[in-house]
Amino acid sequence: MSQVLLPRLSKASAPLTREVMAVNEFGAPTPVSIPCERPLTVYVDKRELVTLMTLGAHPELLVLGFLLARTEFSVWEYSIFFAIALLIGVLMTIPIGGADMPV
């Protein structure tokens, strides 16, 4: 029986916003929080694979999702993913009755 290796995740994160000083409509300086985007470089076997831009909330989960998306899936797995995405799209549209959907 083969052993399943699971990733060990840390609690790595970064603040989602940072404060900057802005000038309000009266000309007074005011602190404002803005989103803070950061580069995240992914290394595999000590080689740079890709650099992703992230807000920093859960960088490890972003990398796991990226690596999962790069793996090869069978037609069956793609069909399941498409069906779930379609179902979610339809269920999200039903409550508004498609009112803001273009014809």
Image: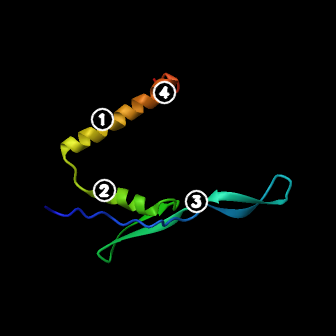
Residue 16, numbered circle: 3
Quarter containing the C terminus: top left
Identify the secondary structure beneath mark 3.
loop
Q: Earlier in the sequence, mark 3 or mark 2?
A: 3
**Distance in Å between CA atoms under marks 2 and 4:** 32 Å
Decide: few, some or many residues near mark 1? Use Cα within 10 Å; few <14, some 14-19, many ≥20: few
Q: Earlier in the sequence, mark 2 or mark 4?
A: 2
Residue in the image at 48% along x and 67% along y: 12
Residue holding disc 4: 101
Give the residue type that dot 2 points to.
Answer: Leu
Give the residue type that dot 1 points to.
Answer: Ala
Judging depth in this view, the residue of 35 and 62 nearest the camera is 62
Q: Do callouts 3 and 1 mark residues in contact (Cβ within 8 Å)?
A: no
Q: Earlier in the sequence, mark 4 or mark 3?
A: 3
Identify the secondary structure beneath mark 4.
loop
Which residue is the extreme one toward the left? Answer: 1
Q: Do callouts 3 and 2 mark residues in contact (Cβ within 8 Å)?
A: no
Residue holding disc 2: 68
x and y percentages locating residue 51 in the rendered image = 41, 67
**Distance in Å between CA atoms under marks 3 and 2:** 24 Å
Q: Depth-wise, is mark 4 or mark 3 nearer the camera? A: 3
Res. 68 image quadrant: bottom left
From this view, report whether residue 62 is shown above or below residue 49.
Answer: above
**Distance in Å between CA atoms under marks 4 and 3:** 32 Å
**Distance in Å between CA atoms under marks 2 and 1:** 19 Å
Give the residue type that dot 4 points to.
Answer: Met
Residue holding disc 1: 83
